[in-house]
Image (cartoon, rainbow, N blue to C red):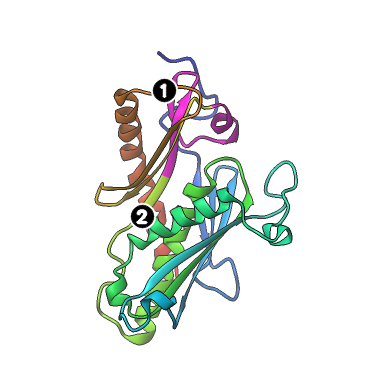
Amino acid sequence: MTGYTRIERTLDQIRKLEIDTNIQPNNPNSCLVKLGNTHVLCSAVIEDKVPGFLRNSGKGWLTAEYGMLPSSTNERVDREAARGKQSGRTQEIQRLIGRSLRCAVNLDVLGEKTIKIDCDVISADGGTRTASIIGGYVSLARAVNAYKKKYNISNQIIVNQIGAISIGVVKGTVCIDLDYPEDSSAEVDCNVVMSSDGQFIEFQSTGEEAKFTKQTILDFIDLVEKSMPEIHKIQDLAISIA
């Protein structure tokens, strides 16, 4: 059963995805991800230290920070630093970004270094966490490539390419890459993180207002698998830009 039709794109079509690089003059690994009207500034740095639990282990670490700028939504959102603590939503999203991107890196080869990924939402129109993962991977890959070149490292540090996209059920209809009006009215909401070899890293699916069937999950998988090569191709292009 279908009861929803998009005007500007088909149900299986993601929004226009653009990734602009070298956005911050002080960080050549920075990029601006534009997924429709969702815009996220991402960057990566590699620091010569690790958390205490990894000292003298020979292993590296990757962590992520995520935040929404005050005018990223229709109504101003306060900076969380001004409130003195992060919301549960922010903590959950940055953990998701960190978990996802750790799957991209061989932390044993990295050595006792920490890669820090920063994702700041400039404009939010649904899918900010998936856009953050898309751009976070680009910044990560650019930072690692520059690091390997600087120190003449031949060992492979990046071992998986990571992409992400949202999908859901709106008015009984499965559609991919939900914008904010779709996301806020969806009966089922799902965020999927995948590697370029076709394996899943995260599959977060929630019945917001309804239960959903096994067939719905299979429909989700089908649309995500069809969309992911396009996302990886755009990521590759952004990584290759000098």
Task: Examine the rendering and report whether any part of residue 18 can be seen.
Answer: no
* Earlier residue among tags 2 and 1: 2
Spot occupied by residue 167 in the image (x, y as percentages of width and height): 43, 34
Q: Position of residue 14 (x, y in %)?
A: 45, 38
Q: Is residue 227 on the magenta stretch? A: no
Is 90 situated above or below 138? above
Residue drawn where x is 26% and y is 72% of the image: 156
Considering the numbered disc 2 on the image, is that residue within a helix, a strand or a loop?
A: strand
Residue appearing at x 44%, y 81% in the figure: 49
Give the total of numbered labels: 2
Q: Most extreme residue toward the front, as rendered?
A: 53
Which portion, as a residue range, is magenta?
165-185
- x 29%, y 52%: residue: 196
Q: Quadrant of the N terminus?
A: top left
Where is the C terminus found, in terms of image quarters? bottom left
Q: Is residue 173 magenta?
A: yes
Residue type at the position of mark 1: Lys
Q: Which residue is mark 1?
A: 211
Q: Position of residue 2 (x, y in %)?
A: 43, 15
